[in-house]
Amino acid sequence: DSQSNSDIVTTSSTMSSGSAMMLDQISSDECPTPITKRKDDDCDLQDLTSSSKKQCTKIIKEEKIKND
């Protein structure tokens, strides 16, 4: 069980970092006011630490839709 947990955390961390970076770039390009978006991103990042599983699912879903 311990090993499984470790694997999940690692995957979540890696995915979050990649998604956050991508989202940051897209937001900067889309929004003329990156300051507001940045503040939101900061909150998101903090929330990720609290519930990476929940947040990760949200990010992945958004990315999937965008890719489609």
Image (cartoon, rainbow, N blue to C red):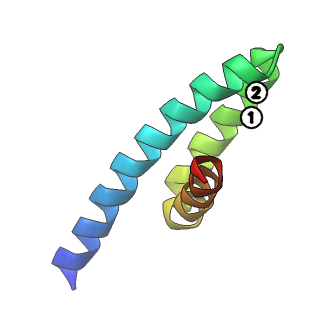
In the displayed structure, would residue 28 be above or below residue 9?
above
Tell me whether circle 1 and circle 2 mark residues in contact (CB < 8 Å): yes
In the displayed structure, would residue 21 be above or below residue 57?
above
Count of all numbered marks drawn on residues in the image: 2
The residue at 52%/58% (across/down) is 56
In the displayed structure, would residue 17 be above or below residue 61?
above
Considering the numbered disc 2 on the image, is that residue within a helix, a strand or a loop?
helix
Looking at the rendered structure, the kind of residue marked 1 is Asp
Crowd rating for badge 1 (residues with CA inside 10 Å; few <14, some 14–19, many 20+): few
The residue at 59%/44% (across/down) is 46
Task: Work out which quarter of the rendered image holds the N terminus and state it.
Answer: bottom left
How far across and down, in percent of the image, does residue 50 sit?
55, 57
Q: Which mark is residue 37?
A: 2
Question: In the image, is 11 to the left or to the right of 43?
Answer: left
The residue at 50%/52% (across/down) is 49
How far across and down, in percent of the image, does residue 2 sit?
20, 79
How far across and down, in percent of the image, does residue 4 sit?
23, 78
Looking at the rendered structure, the kind of residue marked 2 is Lys
Choose between 35 and 64: the one closer to the eye: 64
Q: Which mark is residue 40?
A: 1
